[in-house]
Every structure is written in structure tokens, then in C-alpha cells.
Image: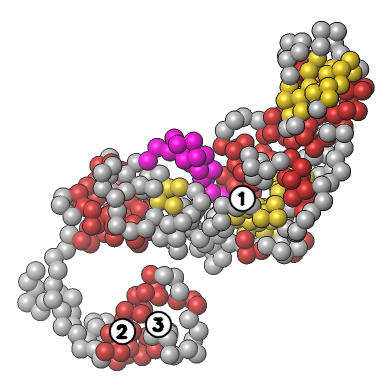
Amino acid sequence: MSDTASVAEDDPEVPEIDLPSDAFDAVLDAVSDLGPGEPLRFEGFSVARDADDQYVIAYGDRQTGLSEREFHEALDERAPAVTDWYTFEHVVGEFGPRRAFLRWIEDADGRTVADRYAALAAGIERAWGQLRITATVTDRGERRYDIRHADDAGVPAAELDAYEDPLDARDIVKLDAKGRYRPLKTAPTLDSGWVFPALSPRDAYETVETVYPATVVNWHRERQGELDVTHWRETMARQSGIYGVVRTWDRGEGHEHANWVAEACCDDSQCLKRREWEYDDETDLDVDGGDGVFPCREPCSVVVSGARKWTRLESEQSRTYEFELTPSEKEQVEAVIDAVADGRVDEIREADTKDPANRYRTRFLRAKRFDDAGNLSGTPTEPDDGSQ
């Protein structure tokens, strides 16, 4: 997943910005709160109020003794910088994950105001999981955000179901395209066909956090060097009740078991987070943690629930079974397992009998190799003598 913003078209022009009264009033209030001569800084210039309650602009040559009307005219000429300050200082607010995320969208810490406003005029696009976020700017310097599924990039908003309230995203994320419940909100199963076409900065942040809870917060913590990671052993050690059984996996072979669980649950094909937790502080897992832009700081409920079930299954003693299969049939069984594990079953065409996991080919294998009791090659799971 790219960490770079893209612009919708090449060489966009800087838009004409009219300084809104609320932005100008905010500058007046901010300057009034400062002492005489103390500057309020924007990108490329600063403003202040002198001892005679006149205004000063420092931009190359200083302009002094400005009346409020002259001050307004001077700021109107520099409206992009003023509205940029107003957007992040007053509309967005706090120095935290919300501001960091919205500034990241337009690369505000690496590009000038002029460059960003030119790019915003065309639309700056960012990917966040399966979301496509497009930031634009109005002729008053106000940010607007279009948030939709990445699969719907380029689709006219009129052809999608439009929403305005960030809380509407709670219903969008509940079910996948087949109407099945999504227990993991960061699974790559987000349904498409919807759009939030013109969100304010705060509503854009709330929408993203509703679709992918805590992802922006943890992304910000990681960027600040403050991500608190809870590893596998610590997570499993605090399980109790029906989940307490997972603690038995930390007896000798816990590291190997944790690898299996992470490979099953934490791959990019299953979760869009990038796993940062390991076995413990001193022992890394042997499987890749993924490439997602937002981090996973601890084993989630899906991992813990799966580990509980697999702990019980792994308590069974291994047995040796003898099956009669042709080499092609053995490879077919392996292909079927891979197809199910990778979620590719629905992609296999019914007419494609060359694919080992094809439905008709699999039904043929069942007809040939299963007995009336459903045993592969007629071999029962339990020994005939009932021994364990």
C-alpha cells in the first residue's frame, strides 16, 4: 500500500481563494491574545499588533500601521496561507491523531501551501485500507473529503449510495458483499457501492475511524514512537474462563503454535493491519507481519478465538491413516485446501474442470473416494476397535 499522496491530474493550477470572515475574525482574536509585537506566524509571513493597536505584516518588506480594513485586504491577498492556518488551527483543532491524519492526506509537512492548494484543486487521493479518500478545497479554503470504497474510484457519486453522517458507516461495515457478518472490521471484505461525497475535516476523520476503528490512533502513536505493543505470550497469559485453555500452548511449543495462528489470521489477504506483535519481547515470529499502513498492536479477538479452538484441536493425539489416492487426487486435495484457505472458491468457474478445486471435479472426487458414511477412502476417523 502506497504511503504517497497522488494528485488527480498533472500540473494543477492554484485556485483563487476568498478569505472568509470567520478566518479573518480568528486571526484578529489570535493577534489580540498576543502581546504587542508578538507575531502570529503563517507559512512565509507573520502578523502582529503594535502598541498603537495597528497591524503589522512581515513578508519581505514590513507593512506597518495597517488599519483593520487594510489588514483584511493584505490577508485576503494571502488567503491560501491564512485559510490553511485556520483549517488546521480552528476547524481541525487538537495536536493529535486527527490533525496528523488530515495533514498526512495532503502531505502538509512536506509541501508548501501553494503546492498543496494547487493539488487540492485537482484532488489529492490517499488509500487507507480499502478506502479511497480524495481531499479537495473550496474557493473559501475549506477542505472537503470524498470517501468511498477503492473499487468505486472514478465512479460518479450519483451512481453510488450517498451518505453524510459518519455514523452511517456503522451499517456499511457490518456485512460483506454477500450479506455475511464481518467479525473483523479490518478484513479486506468491505462492501462497495457507497460514498460520503463532501465531508468536513472532522467528519472525514470520524468516518475513517468508524470504518476502521482505532487505526488512525495507533498509526499516530507509531509515528510518535509511542505504540504500546502487547505480544502473544502476554495476551495469552491474561486469558481466563473458556479462553484460559490457550495458555497451555506456551509449554515448549508455544512459539510454533503462535506462528501457525499468525500465518492463518494475520496475512494481508485476511487482515489489512500490519502485525507488530511478536511471540514476546525477545522472540520474533517466523511469519511476515504484512504491509498495511496501520499497525496491529496486539492479538485481536479473532486471533484469540481461533487460538482457543485450535488449542483444543491440537490436544488430540496424532494417528496414522492410510488413504488410497492417485497422485493427481492427492494434488487435488491440496489444491482444495489452498483454495478454501485463500478464499478463492468463488473465483473458480464451474466450467473450468482443469482447476483441481473446481466444484464438479471435487464432487467427482467425493463420489469416487467417499463411502456412504462420508469417510475418505472408506477409512473411519475412529479405529474399529475403539482404541485411542
Q: Is residue 212 magenta?
A: yes
Instruction: Return the residue at label 1.
Output: 169
Query: Which residue is found at the position 72% from the left and 25% from the top?
Result: 41
Q: Which residue sits furthest top?
A: 51
Badge 2 local density, few (<14 within 10 Å), some, or many (20+)?
Answer: some
* Distance from the alpha carbon under mark 1 to that under mark 2: 43 Å
**Residue at image coords 91%, 17%:** 67
Residue 212 in the image: state x and y as whole percent. Answer: 53, 49
> Does residue 318 appear to the left or right of 26 in the view shown?
left
Residue displayed at 31% across by 79% down: 334
Amino acid bearing label 3: Ala
Q: Which residue is mark 3?
A: 357
Q: Please state which of residues 322 and 273 is positioned toward the viewer in this rendering.
A: 273
Label 3 – label 1 distance at C-alpha? 36 Å
Looking at this view, is 233 or 320 the one in front?
233
Q: Looking at numbered disc 2 in the image, what kind of residue is underneath it?
A: Glu
Of 5 and 278, which appears nearest the observer?
A: 5
| Nearest to the observer: residue 222 or residue 178 | 222
Instruction: Give the residue type that dot 1 points to.
Output: Ala
- Number of residues whose C-alpha sits closer than 10 Å to that of mark 3, classed few (under 14), some (14–19) or many (20 or more): many
In magenta, the rendered stretch is 211-229
Q: Is residue 313 magenta?
A: no
- Residue 150 in the image: above or below residue 364: above
Q: Measure how far apart labels 2 and 3 are at the Cα level.
A: 10 Å
SS class of the residue under badge 3?
loop
In the rendered view, tell whether residue 92 sits above or below residue 336.
Answer: above
Location of mark 2 (residue): 331
